Image: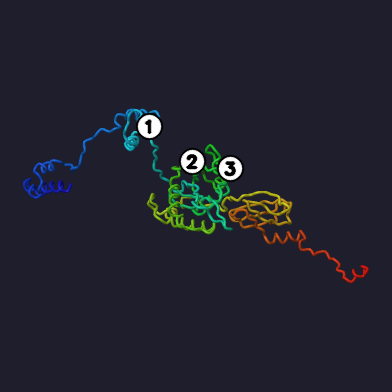
């Protein structure tokens, strides 16, 4: 290649004769003339040889026409019965070229988002279980959210896929992003999708209170929220490795700090910093309402004679003075609160625990229970008689 270029330079640029080029390069004159006549660089060419697969191409076409998804292994077995003696590699190469003719591949168009148009939601499952105290760990999920225009990312840790937990995660992500988009995008998650593309009552009520629209994607269509899917891969390779967590609060704190840093980086797709775009996007979105729609669980129960209520496998004490009366139990992600329905008295207030199989007793409840049961009453008085009195009654 180098000599071909040098020969052409000497002849066409320096006007050196073929005889002189022959003297300088030591090449034959015919080779030099051929190099001067050829405008393309020289390359090694091997004459085409017939393939062992050529006699069977018509049969392969027929098989693919009848079933485009027929596995290559089965095609090889069928043509071996007809005399094929070639290897697997040349058949695979042939199928790679022929199969798309009968099985067109799905194509995608590039999506462009308007500021404040869509907010994509999904669930990300941490690779390891999250410590929740008392020497226990628990399986968790992260409700993730990403704005289509700015690509600003937020996440909230929850421990179930039930509607109250997912709605809490959505509300927390919205507070982190600081404004309301036009539509919330979800796939067909059980607590979000009621079937047939319709939302569940809880999800529809949440969107109605915020006055936002929703978009529930078609089944098996993760590409429709591909921006968030790519962020999940980024979380898997950048957030999780090399981190340790001591509790669910520590996990959330580290996740918040990581998303803040991620939003400050230059995003490869949009070639901009998400945090800077978010400032622009907030200007075109509506502000968050105050207060935000609540996502707490509300239950009504009657306090049993043993004044404890069980929630999420844990037992929480209640005021024993309210035994037999009905209370409204309100459970958030941080505390468990019970109030008597008839008088509004506080029945209990406990910090919620995500560990399992535990009993939590308020010292005030225990003291009141002991008072009501009379466990601290005095023991009955018993007369103590001197032994001499018994000696007088017994004859010697």
Q: Earlier in the sequence, mark 1 or mark 3?
A: 1
Circle 2 residue: 217
Q: Quadrant of the C terminus?
A: bottom right
Task: Tell me the residue at 56%/53% (across/down).
Answer: 290
- Mark number for residue 77? 1
Closer to the camera in the image, 16 or 26: 26
**Mark 2: secondary structure:** loop
Q: Is residue 360 left or right of residue 165?
A: right
**Mark 1: secondary structure:** helix
Task: Tell me the residue at 50%/45% (across/down).
Answer: 184
Residue 176 location in percent, x, y? 50, 54
Viewer-nearest of discs 1 and 3: 1
Residue 352 location in percent, x, y? 61, 56
Q: Is residue 235 left or right of residue 192?
A: left
> Mark 3 packing: few (<14 Cα in 10 Å), some, or many (20+)?
some
Circle 3 residue: 201
Q: Are marks 2 and 3 in contact (CB under 8 Å)?
A: no
Task: State the separation of the CA atoms marked 1 and 2.
Answer: 41 Å
> Mark 2 packing: few (<14 Cα in 10 Å), some, or many (20+)?
some
Viewer-nearest of discs 1 and 2: 1
Residue 83 location in percent, x, y? 32, 29
């Amino acid at each position: 290649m180098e000599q071909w270029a040098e020969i052409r330079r000497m002849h066409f640029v320096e006007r050196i004769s073929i005889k002189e080029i022959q003297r300088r390069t030591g090449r034959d004159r015919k080779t030099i003339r051929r190099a001067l006549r050829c405008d393309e660089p020289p390359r090694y060419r091997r004459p085409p040889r017939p393939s062992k697969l050529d006699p069977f191409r018509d049969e392969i076409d027929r098989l693919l026409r009848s079933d485009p998804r027929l596995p290559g292994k089965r095609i090889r077995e069928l043509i071996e019965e007809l005399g094929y003696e070639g290897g697997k590699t040349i058949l695979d190469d042939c199928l790679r070229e022929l199969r798309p003719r009968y099985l067109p591949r799905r194509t995608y168009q590039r999506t462009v988002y308007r500021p404040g148009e869509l907010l994509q939601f999904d669930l990300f499952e941490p690779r390891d279980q999250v410590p929740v105290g008392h020497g226990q760990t628990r399986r968790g999920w992260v409700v993730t959210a990403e704005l289509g225009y700015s690509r600003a990312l937020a996440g909230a840790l929850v421990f179930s896929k039930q509607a109250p937990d997912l709605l809490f995660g959505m509300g927390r992500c919205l507070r982190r992003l600081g404004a309301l988009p036009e539509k919330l995008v979800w796939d067909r998650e059980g607590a979000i999708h009621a079937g047939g593309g319709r939302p569940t009552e809880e999800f529809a009520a949440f969107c109605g209170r915020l006055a936002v629209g929703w978009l529930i994607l078609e089944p098996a269509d993760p590409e429709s929220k591909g921006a968030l899917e790519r962020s999940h891969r980024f979380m898997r390779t950048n957030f999780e490795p090399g981190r340790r967590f001591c509790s669910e609060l520590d996990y959330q704190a580290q996740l918040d700090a990581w998303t803040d840093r991620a939003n400050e980086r230059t995003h490869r797709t949009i070639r901009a910093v998400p945090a800077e775009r978010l400032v622009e996007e907030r200007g075109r979105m509506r502000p968050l309402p105050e207060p935000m729609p609540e996502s707490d669980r509300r239950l009504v129960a009657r306090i049993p004679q043993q004044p404890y209520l069980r929630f999420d496998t844990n037992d929480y004490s209640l005021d024993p003075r309210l035994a037999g009366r009905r209370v409204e139990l309100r459970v958030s992600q941080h505390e468990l609160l019970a109030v008597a329905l008839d008088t509004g008295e506080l029945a209990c207030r406990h910090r919620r625990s995500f560990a399992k199989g535990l009993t939590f007793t308020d010292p005030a409840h225990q003291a009141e229970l002991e008072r009501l049961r009379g466990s601290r009453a005095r023991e009955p008085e018993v007369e103590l008689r001197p032994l001499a009195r018994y000696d007088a009654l017994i004859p010697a």
